[in-house]
Amino acid sequence: MTYESRHTNACALLSEEEFARVIAAAEIYLSSRSILSSVIATLGNVVQRGLAMVRADWREPITAKIHETLVLLQGAAVWNMDDDPGRAPKDWLFLATVIASGIAGGAGGLPTLLVELPITTGLMLRSIADIGRAHGGRIEDPLFRATCIEVFAYGTPIEEDDEELTFLAARLGAVKVAEATAEMITKVAARYAAVLGPQIAARSVPLTGAVLGAVLNGAYMSFYQSMAQVLFTLFPIEWKHDPAQVRSCFASVVRELREKQVTRLRAPRRD
């Protein structure tokens, strides 16, 4: 398959191998976002009922709790992890654990969310770091940890695909700072709070919290694991080239792949 994006200024800087890695990251991104959107759409009626039941005064403490959690987990989530780049990640183990956490926390309804949230987020962050390490990242590298935090900025269901892609291309300054700054974490926390909207809504509907908590925990863990694959596939390329140009190339490839998918779907079938 040929790519018009290859001829853009941003993509022209990359070697053939690097461009192939960008394509692979774009394919993972599109696939994972499509699956996540499908899960949320399937639960649409339940989520809408739940959102109507959520009190406005719950939103501020949840956002504050997320911010506090991310600040705490920057180092705590990777505590005692071996700095062993290339080790295969244990995606399945973390996925099973957050599903179990979703069942236990969901059974208690909305009041248990603030208790479960640091646990689930910590498990997700450790899984993200596990994937980053498999891609050659070093646990003690501040930029590595900042990229782990950045993963939580994606997956919000309230945005169109292109809006999230534009945000992703900005990279939150993660490659420009020595650590995940307070400003960056504030931005991530606000977006992660939006991501949790369906979770909060599901727990507000009687009798369904445990099941939906498990389903949504599993869906978001899978999505964040995929986003970790995306960001850490781009990570070494961003070390060699201008990170802004690498992200610009990635965004161009995603848009081109999406257009190709739409064209294939609209094409008349040949019997």
Image (spheres, grey):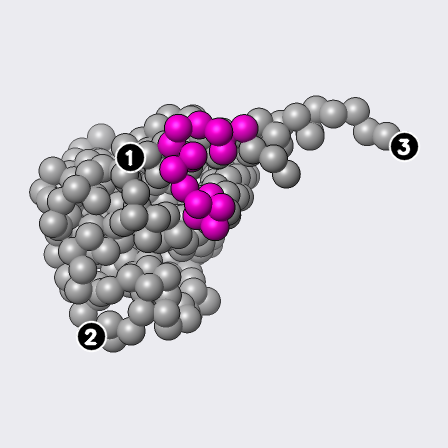
Q: Secondary structure at mark 3?
A: loop
Q: Is residue 3 magenta?
A: no
Q: Give, as a three-letter code, the residue at label 3.
A: Asp
Q: Which residues are magenta?
A: 4-19
Q: Is residue 134 visible?
A: yes
Query: Where residue 145 appears, x then y in whole percent?
Result: 21, 55
Q: Give, as a three-letter code, the residue at label 1.
A: Ala
Q: Earlier in the sequence, mark 1 or mark 3?
A: 1
Q: Earlier in the sequence, mark 1 or mark 2?
A: 2
Considering only vertical position in the picture, is 26 above or below 99? above
Separation of disc 3 and disc 2 at Cα? 58 Å
Left or right: residue 113 compared with residue 24: left
| Residue designated by label 1 | 244
Q: Give, as a three-letter code, the residue at label 2.
A: Asn
Observer-nearest residue: 141 or 239?
A: 239
Query: Where residue 118 appears, x then y in whole percent?
Result: 22, 56
Query: Where residue 176 appears, x then y in whole percent?
Result: 17, 42
